């Protein structure tokens, strides 16, 4: 793995002669490359990079290798389904709602997320209308907390309230645990920021029917080995962020005998009609793997990325718990529904970018030409997107492989150094919400993350290692 | 489509100067190509080809276009499940068994097919042991008939007896109907030529449980639009002959709500545990499409191929009902289970080659790198295999598309002229049975069909058009 890192370094040496010498003295080939200013010539970043590739280079490389090893060794399994209040202490008493992204004040919360939070208050019976809910949220009578700080990950608006059933996902190897709500599917839903009566009714169905049944199904059929299914899904055209249809069908295949035994036709129809149902399982598993990788000093691997439609933030495994943030980006390369334009689009949102941190989603587009086609590209474009991500990652996954690349692994372990230096940031395959009307999803595209937090992480990491 | 045919012709003109002139006079480009003797220089075949590309060329082209149009227009749906005796007149009285391939005398039946036929006699209660069954079969007290002549297609040994439930597949567009048994899955089964008590017990389960339940499921959930599912499965890594896992999961997704409503845990467990369950649906649908294409005078499209481990035979759409046959081929490029060698392998067997006649299976390997990997090849090999088949087909499917080829259609409409002339025959992705011990499946590979029947079809077609 170190060799691979060194090989990549060749591409950046032109701007860092001191570092190139250091590499050459270690026997690695140094090749001439098309010149581009590292880190766009940002002086502080370049200085930090010199330290992180130079004097601290082998320490960082070892740390990164260990982080990727831990991520790859994780085996997150959905072991249980239970009401969020029973599993997440922060939701066990009082009026608290979890949301995607980092800590944010109500007035900065983007419109779709505000709508989802208000709807959750109505669902919980704290308010009788969205308007009443909004005043509770404004005054702080209902408190907000970022799910990621409590082991919860939610897609898009990512709201979790005490009565919602959650997947309980456990990685026995590391002991990491994570939680996520059921995916609500397409249409009028909270995750898409609609939040009307229909979307609240779906939550009641989750609470009263689907949740309890899924709990019994898991008890009966055993835990769901999530990464075993996602690895198979990659062989079936899913990249596991924008598309997880085939993987969802694998889950249905596993659960069908249980449905035959326990009944639950309405739940079965919902589950089989929701192409995104698997998404939150992938997310919770990725969060487990991310936690498993956190806390290896010196690691520049980005093990967490999250967005809330206002801010985007990331963490590196070497500095666990410390956020590096920037304003959320617009979703680019987006295909919008007829009648909508870029000005209707909310900014990038959701905890789902943790998927890219463990080698799926935007890292694995080569596995899903249908996703690339969505952005107007062909099979070659799909492969190019994955190869581009390979330029900023530490290695290749052993368990997540891509048929079109002769079963090469997906790029895994986003290296903040490479992202900062090459000015190439992770691409997140994601949906687009309406920015203001509660119209829900209006499209999908690729969110290219802002580079500033990667630079900030590099600076902080260099500082930490110099202490 | 005619333009496409003409373009292909350029590759064969070197050996057929008179024909090259004819094409050139029609304004088509004639390019120099690497020389290879057409039809390996077989004089009669070359003469017939001259007629079929020359004076009859446009008639054949129009006929082929019409056949492919009909195949592509077919929409076979599984509308019903019922005991074979209720659907197939030949099985309604007396002691008759259907088998794969063409008409054959008992003593020429290959070992695995003999075992399956004997087991079917025991299953029907006509004999109390396989030994007793064999004497009934030897004496003709149990009669044999080729399924293909009665609208039935069966994989591998392809045995169908009166009490077995069958899929009833109907193409409303053409009115064509076809039947196939349920796939028995891996292990000790009749289709693999085992035929022991365990394999007979599975047939009882089909007759008593799975069959009646599947009939109720279809009534409840509506017909299965088979080609809609196979088209989706192609996007999910299936080529639909050797691999139909993803497509099978799509079926499970469709049926899961019905299972929740009707129960049937054992059936659900069998269905979800059998990766080949969809195979016989694809086969029956392909047979429907094949029948829809049959009977367009002058067409050189091979709309039916079948093998029984002894003989292989084909039909062309221009001469419906007429078989052109040769000894069955060995399965090549085969991966055999440990402990087995080529000498253990039975010859190519099964009605399943009808799948290749409608643009799936060996035609669609590019969609399934996992299948190519099975033969030791990579993604490029998978694509090359499909492109090779494109050299002997009339056109490209509109509904069956391949993500890795930027959603180009699969090659469809095997042209007997091109196969005979280029000496390239259809590749069938298929299993390998043990030749003599009843060990069942010992591997899988590609069966390259013998060229003689393609030549014979070309001769017969030229004769027919000259009448």
Image (cartoon, coloured by chain):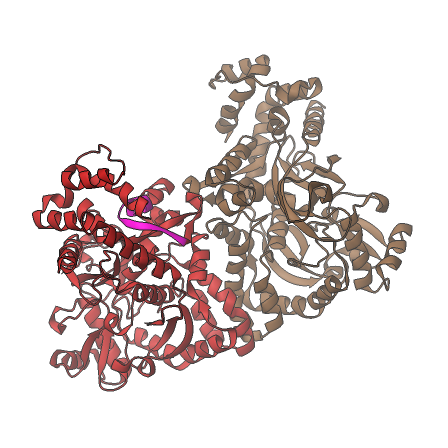
Chain colours: A brown, B red
- Hey, which residue is sitting farthest front in the picture? B25
Q: Is residue B16 left or right of residue B338?
A: left
Q: Does residue B120 belong to the magenta stretch?
A: no
Above/below status of B142 relative to B310? below
Q: Position of residue B373 (x, y in %)?
A: 35, 46
Q: Which residues are magenta?
A: B385-398
Question: On the picture, is B172 further left or further right than A308?
Answer: left
Considering every residue shown, the one lying at the far left of the view is: B43
User: Going 57% across and 12% down the picture, which residue do you hit?
Assistant: A17
Q: Nearer the viewer, residue B292 or B402?
A: B292
* Residue located farthest toward the right when viewing the structure as drawn: A139
- Vertical arrangement, residue B390 with respect to residue B432, above or below: above
Give the quarter of the figure containing the C terminus of chain A.
Answer: top right
Q: Residue visible at 43% across and 80% down? A: B212
Residue A288 location (% of width, % of height): 63, 48
In the picture, measured across the screen, residue A431 lies left or right of residue B211, that is: right
State the residue in front, B87 or B296.
B296
Indicate the position of residue B288 as horizontal and vertical percent values: 34, 67
Give me the residue at 34% from left, 47% from top. B372
């Amino acid at each position: 793995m170190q060799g691979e890192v060194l090989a990549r370094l060749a591409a950046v040496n032109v701007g860092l002669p001191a570092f190139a010498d250091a590499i050459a003295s270690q026997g690695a080939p140094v090749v001439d490359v098309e010149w581009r200013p590292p880190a766009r010539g940002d002086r502080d970043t370049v200085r930090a990079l010199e330290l992180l590739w130079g004097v601290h280079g082998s320490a960082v490389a070892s740390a990164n290798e260990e982080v990727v090893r831990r991520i790859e060794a994780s085996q997150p399994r959905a072991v249980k389904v239970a009401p969020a209040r029973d599993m997440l202490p922060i939701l066990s008493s009082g009026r608290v709602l979890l949301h995607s992204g980092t800590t944010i004040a109500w007035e900065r919360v983007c419109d779709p997320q505000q709508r989802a939070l208000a709807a959750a208050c109505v669902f919980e019976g704290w308010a009788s209308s969205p308007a009443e809910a909004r005043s509770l949220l404004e005054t702080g009578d209902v408190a907000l907390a970022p799910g990621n700080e409590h082991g919860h990950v939610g897609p898009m608006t990512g709201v979790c309230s005490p009565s919602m059933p959650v997947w309980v996902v456990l990685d026995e190897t590391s002991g990491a645990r994570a939680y996520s709500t059921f995916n609500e599917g397409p249409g009028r839903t909270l995750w898409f920021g609609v939040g009307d009566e229909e979307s609240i009714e779906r939550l009641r169905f989750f609470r009263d029917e689907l949740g309890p049944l899924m709990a019994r199904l898991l008890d009966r059929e055993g835990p769901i080995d999530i990464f075993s299914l996602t690895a198979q899904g990659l062989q079936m055209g899913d990249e596991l962020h924008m598309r997880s249809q085939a993987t969802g069908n694998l889950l249905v295949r596993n659960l069908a005998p249980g449905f035959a035994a326990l009944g639950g036709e309405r739940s079965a129809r919902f589950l089989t009609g929701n192409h995104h149902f698997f998404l939150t399982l992938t997310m919770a598993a990725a969060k487990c793997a991310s936690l498993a990788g956190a806390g290896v000093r010196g690691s520049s691997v980005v093990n967490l990325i999250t967005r809330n439609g206002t801010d985007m933030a990331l963490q590196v495994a070497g500095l666990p718990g410390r956020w590096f943030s920037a304003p959320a980006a617009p979703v680019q390369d987006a295909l919008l529904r007829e009648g909508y334009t870029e000005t209707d689009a909310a900014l990038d949102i959701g905890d789902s970018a943790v998927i890219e941190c463990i080698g799926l989603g935007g890292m694995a587009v080569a596995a899903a030409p249908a996703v690339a086609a969505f952005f107007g590209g062909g099979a070659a474009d799909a492969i190019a997107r994955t190869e581009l991500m390979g330029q900023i990652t530490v290695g290749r996954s052993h368990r997540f492989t891509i048929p079109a690349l002769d079963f090469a692994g997906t790029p895994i372990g986003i290296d903040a150094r490479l992202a900062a230096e090459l000015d190439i940031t992770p691409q997140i395959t994601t949906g687009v919400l309406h920015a203001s009307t509660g119209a829900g999803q209006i499209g999908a595209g690729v969110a290219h993350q802002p580079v500033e937090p990667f630079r900030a992480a590099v600076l902080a990491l260099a500082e930490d290692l110099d202490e």
